[in-house]
Amino acid sequence: MPSFEPATGPDPSRQPVIIAALRTPVCRANGQLKPLRAEELLSPVLRSLLDTSGVDGSDVEDVVIGNAVGGGGNLARYAALHAGLPVGIPGLTVDRQCGSGLDAIALASRLVASGGNGVFLAGGVESISTAPLRARRNPDADGGLDFYSRAAFVPPAFGDPDMGVAAENVALEYGISRERQDDFALRSHQRAVAARAAGAFGTETVALQAGDALVQTDDGPRASLNAGLMGRFPPAFVPGGSVTAGNSCFDADAASAVVITSLERARHLGAADGLLVLGCDTAGVEPELLGIGAAVAAKRLLAKLDVKAGELDLVEFNEAFASQTLACLDALGVEPERANLDGGALAMGHAYGASGAVLVTRLLAQSRRIAEAQPVRESLALAMISIAGGMGTAVMFRYAQLQEA
């Protein structure tokens, strides 16, 4: 998708900008957040976003939310009402599986770019713990139910590998060794543990009441991991393979969302800074190598925006598996050490429909942290995610001060 910013300069009434971004703690499925359904995860984030940004709920034009394994029924509308937004505010639920949260933000960006100075709430949510069971009706006379764990992502003729098998395919195709995967996964945990201890996630996280417990922090990062322990994990998906439970993500529950509007409206609201959305791209790839989808989308986006990988200040990639993360970063020419500065899904967990929105929330928090520490007013940031069925989405941002001098 071309940049939202014309060569002659941005039209402030059509330039999308994210002025607030928040998330819940990311917690292991069937863990601390197990009592909460998807709308109960998301609605506190939506309410907090309105408070943070100074936006009145009646001024929201639409609520666009990604979700992958929920029960349907337009979760975005349900959560908006559950959050106390006026009944006149609609909702739209997006399903692009793992990419749903990032694609919801991309869609809201396009809606802003179409004009009207609208304010949107966009993001994603996943409660894997409370996701409904799925079943097909058998064609036999009694119409019995055939339960299944996941939907088919593509027709059988294209191959429809489970995620772990697809990660092995990528490791073999792109020569990603077990050692590199383990090293990357260990670094993800170490970074996340350090960031959590330093309070780096505090400003972006909304605490949740789950039963009798107040959940305030992510529960995935493990300080006890070391290289020796990583090396003892056996192959998890393919005999003799290199993808293990240690270098793969785990399922998680979480919600994350942003306030996105036009630059003109953001200035009117008094927003001091934000992430200008420069462009977005979604690409399809071979389903057997679905993990490489993000790199294809990101390459096309970088070319459209005439940005070199070395010019990126921040990169957030959803670490579903170390193999596909490394393959994508290699393909883009991004050194793995430059990505996911505070760790990623290998340590934090993968909350499917929420994960893409978590990436954007992380980028805004990191950009602000850098701006506070250094006399830098602008930086380039990239969020990208690979998607089941053989796809990938990438979105480019520029962090900037918004008020005119």
Image (tube, helix red, strand yellow):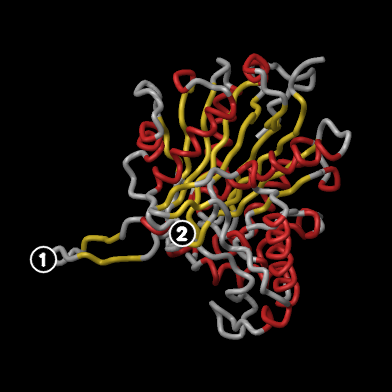
Q: State the residue at coordinates (41%, 31%).
A: 91
Apparent side of residue 21 relative to residue 174 in the rendered image (left or right): left
Q: Amino acid at mark 1?
A: Ala
Quarter of the view holding residue 177: bottom right
Q: Position of residue 54 (x, y in %)?
A: 57, 22
Give left or right: position of 233 versus 31: right
Judged from this view, the residue extending furthest toward the right is: 375
Q: Amino acid at mark 2?
A: Gln
Q: Quadrant of residue 261?
A: top right
Q: How many marks?
A: 2
Residue 149, placed above or below residue 119? below
Give the residue number, with chain letter if any, for mark 1: 141
218 or 315, nearer to the observer: 218
Residue drawn at the location 34% of the way across and 23% of the way down: 87
Looking at the image, residue 207 lies above or below residue 226: above
Helix, strand or loop for disc 1: loop
Residue 166 position in % (x across, y down): 57, 68
Q: Residues within 10 Å of mark 2 (few under 14, many from 20)?
A: many
At horizontal 70% and vertical 49% (from top left) the residue drawn is 200
Q: Quadrant of the N terminus?
A: top right
Q: Residue furthest left?
A: 141
Q: Which mark is residue 57?
A: none
Quadrant of the frame with the C terminus: top right
Could you give the CA–CA distance between mark 2 and mark 1, rounded to whole angstroms? 43 Å
Q: Toward the viewer: 214 or 72?
A: 214
Residue, disc 2: 32
Upstream in sequence: badge 2 or badge 1:
2
